[in-house]
Image (cartoon, coloured by chain):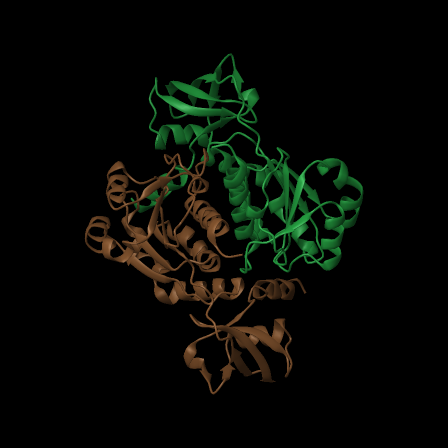
Chain colours: A green, B brown
Amino acid sequence: MVASARWSRILFRMNLILLQPEEVQDCRAVLSDERAKHIRKVLKAEPGKELRIGLLNGPLGIGTVESVNVHEVVLNCIFEDTLPARPSVDLLLAMPRPKVLKRMWAQLAALGVGKIVLLRAEKVERYYFDSHVIDPDFYNKLLMEGLQQARCIHMPEVRIEPLFKPYIEDRFESEFSNHWKLLADPSGERRIRDFQSLENRRVLLAIGPEGGWTPYEVQMLKTRGFELIGMGDRILRTDTATIGLLSVLNERWSGS
Amino acid sequence: MVASARWSRILFRMNLILLQPEEVQDCRAVLSDERAKHIRKVLKAEPGKELRIGLLNGPLGIGTVESVNVHEVVLNCIFEDTLPARPSVDLLLAMPRPKVLKRMWAQLAALGVGKIVLLRAEKVERYYFDSHVIDPDFYNKLLMEGLQQARCIHMPEVRIEPLFKPYIEDRFESEFSNHWKLLADPSGERRIRDFQSLENRRVLLAIGPEGGWTPYEVQMLKTRGFELIGMGDRILRTDTATIGLLSVLNERWSGS
């Protein structure tokens, strides 16, 4: 009883059935994995039931259950004509401790991030980059979980950059030249509320390691156009600060 | 080598040494627990070094190390004349899954919350209230950790209310009559940004269980003065939504 209650609670988070483009052929999708189990056991869907679906990086839609059995669920899929707006924030994140990053993946996908660059900084331990939490097979599953829970279709693009200087000097500029760049740091006296307009530009939010950026790193990032911002007097953990700042950016500028 | 790096990283978060009022006598505090270990091993403090200290629910200050040895650290304490402003947000939180609540304690203290009422809602499993995560000995340690990391002194006041109706009908009104009451729900069309002024009132933020409030619960809370607010189209996990909304409230109205 307790076990089954727990299980349904965990699966409850799938508020959208997300489909890969190749899974949909002639408007039909045949599912046999966790999604099928969720449709059968949690949604208790019978033929005719309409479910919220989405195509990965594509439109949202409605999937009508054609058939359900213990092996598979067949959905008849109709998609909307328009694409949901792409998240307007990208993230330059000093590689967090693997345990922390593991918790963050689904939340980042749920909050909506276009691109995630995981960067080595001086106060990031080298061994963090040996962790399985930056293996695509591991994080893609968690990102999908976050998208399905939040009802989103935009899969964040993830890149790992284990060397700070060559990345910032050689590749950073071409990638983010037009972004409005914000560097979160306890020394930042301006806050996001102090900026009046984004001029429709994408935002790049940089979050440092738990020990903070070094003065050299702050300097390098400032010469690349970053402006320092703070969150008040409190010193927050990487994951708390990231969720908080993404929420503030979203509240301030996203469509209603 | 790796082990010690990990250990120091974990302890790094103590950005303030928090003292209980009874620990300070004649301006001196003698510490022999985790805080002493942190001062010795992470801060590597020697006599004469000045450390940031705070009195629980009292002023911030400076502690000058008088002596350090393997058994204890003696600090000479000087406190500021003024008290930091009390967090202006209280939280009415439908009891989250114990695993989620365990992760939330330190973050709630770090973000700053005056009072936390953990409430039973219909979609909250009864067995959540049997968990050790709502044992004061367990959560006070995590709240202290969050305060010391964020450099804050305000210990949230925690109350457990395992019955929705009697609490809302009999005790709620007298406790929160003057608060500006916000009920977070995916159906909420207004957002925090749409409200112009708080009129210096305290805020009570209500966050539902993962399955949402029932229509009856929403109705009950509305008759008690709650206004519905949303966070856009995304459906967020309890912990993500709580951190996000506390950050947005803090960004919008706290002093800079």
Instruction: Name the spot of residue A4 as percent of width and height, x first.
Output: 33, 41
Q: Quadrant of residue A214?
A: bottom right
Instruction: Name the spot of residue B128 as percent of width and height, x first.
Output: 32, 52
Q: How many marks?
A: 0
Instruction: Name the spot of residue B59 as percent of width and height, x first.
Output: 47, 72
Quarter of the N terminus of chain A within the rendering: top left
Farthest top residue in view: A26
* Along the viewing direction, whichever of A103 and A29 lies nearer the viewer: A103
Q: Is residue B137 above or below residue A165?
A: below
Instruction: Name the spot of residue B101 as percent of width and height, x first.
Output: 40, 53
Q: Is residue B68 visible?
A: no
Q: Is residue A71 above or below residue B161?
A: above
Q: Quadrant of residue B155?
A: bottom left
Q: Is residue B75 above or below residue B110?
A: below
Identity of the residue drawn at 42% across and 51% down: B100
Q: Is residue B22 visible?
A: yes
Q: Quadrant of residue A197?
A: top right
* Along the viewing direction, whichever of A246 and A16 lies nearer the viewer: A246
Question: In the drawing, does residue B249 fall left or right of residue B62?
Answer: left
Q: Is residue B190 above or below residue A125?
A: above
* Along the viewing direction, whichever of B109 and A107 lies nearer the viewer: B109
Identity of the residue drawn at 46% across and 41% down: B193
